[in-house]
Each structure stands twice: as C-alpha cells, then as structure tokens.
Image (spheres, grey):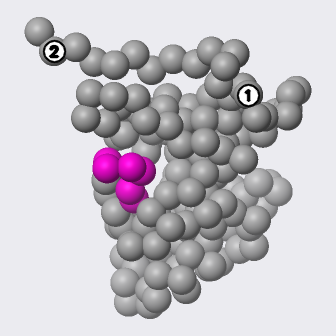
Amino acid sequence: MEVQPVLSFSDKDKVGTLQPHDDAPIVTLRIGGYDMKRMLVDQGSGAEIMYPNLFKRLKLRPENLTCYDSPLIGFNGKIVFPKGQVRLPVQAGLNVMEVNFIMVNAYSPYTAIVTRQWLHAMGAVSSTLHLKVKYSSRDQVEELVGS
C-alpha cells in the first residue's frame, strides 16, 4: 500500500502573512528555463492566461501560437480576443506539467495566470488564507509561498 503525504494547512502556515486579507497567492514558477515572478494562482478560473511580458521574455513569436478563437471575459468585464495558444512546461520544484496558455494582448500586473486545471494536474492544494500552494513531490510535501 502506497502512503501519500497529507496536504494540509495550519495556523503555523499563516506566519509571515498580513491578516486579514483576501488575496490570491502570487508565486514564482519556472517556465521555459526562466523563473517567472508574479504568477497568479486563481482557483476560480478555468483558463491559463499568458500576458505580453511573458510572451516576449520567452522570445516567442506569433508563429508559435496555435489557433484559439473563443473570446474571454476579462477582470474588468470586457470581452478579450486571444491572439492564440501555446503549450509550455511549467515547473514547481521537481514537478513539471505541460500547460496550454492562452495569449491575450492586455495589461496585467501578473505575468500569467495558472488555474485549477494546473492545480489538479500537479495534485496541488492552494490556500488563499495561508497564501501557499502545497503539492507532493517524491514522498514529501513541497510548498510555494505566495506574496
């Protein structure tokens, strides 16, 4: 029988965070060989989004994008038409997951948004209260500490 580490949070995990708050975790993830800061972990969204800064930093070109023609609704409620989609490896610790990012040409304070699809693929649990993401890696619990 295989024993999996338990992914849980306690009051100890809140140390270092300003309470109370209602922020989502903002973490650093490795994408395309670069450590990318300001990655929003959004449990309420279903679409992984990439913004122009990340697209440029990875030296991607329009021909790297595949067609994605479904409009999205932005945070401000306006319709956004994606430029396309690209599949990239996203690394947290030793775990690497392929993610389909939808490229939108819009301003954002974030580099990209990873969503519940990425959390599920990682077998991760996110806590907005603790500003952390925890996941299993090689029989131990690893964590991404958000800001």
Q: Position of residue 72 (x, y in %)?
A: 62, 59
Residue 91 percent coordinates (x, y): 38, 56
The overriding secondary structure of the stretch rendered in magenta is strand
Check disc 2 and report its element: helix, strand or loop: loop
Q: Are marks 1 and 2 in contact (CB under 8 Å)?
A: no
Which residue is under mark 1?
Answer: 15
Q: Is residue 42 left or right of residue 18?
A: left
- Range drawn in magenta: 90-95
Q: Position of residue 21 (x, y in %)?
A: 85, 32
SS at mark 1?
loop
Cα separation between marks 1 and 2: 32 Å
Image coordinates of residue 42 in percent, x first then y, are: 62, 43
Amino acid type, label 2: Glu
Q: Earlier in the sequence, mark 1 or mark 2?
A: 2
Q: Residue furthest top?
A: 1
Dividing the picture into quadrants, the one containing residue 9 is top right
Query: In the depicted view, which residue is nearer to us: 64 or 82?
Result: 64
Residue in view at x 82 percent, y 57 percent? 76
Disc 2: CA contacts within 10 A as few (<14), some (14-19) or many (>=20): few
Q: Amino acid at mark 1?
A: Val
Q: Would residue 49 be counted in the magenta stretch?
A: no
Q: Quadrant of residue 100?
A: bottom left
Q: Quadrant of residue 117?
A: top left
Mark linked to residue 2: 2
The quarter of the image holding the N terminus is top left
Query: Taking 95 as reference, is 131 above or below it?
Result: above
Up-down: is 117 above or below 69? above
Tag nearer the camera, 1 or 2: 1
* 145 to 77, vertically: above or below: above
User: Front-most of 28 and 107?
Assistant: 28
Q: Is residue 10 left or right of residue 57?
A: right
Label 1 neighbour load within 10 Å: few <14, some 14-19, many 20+: few
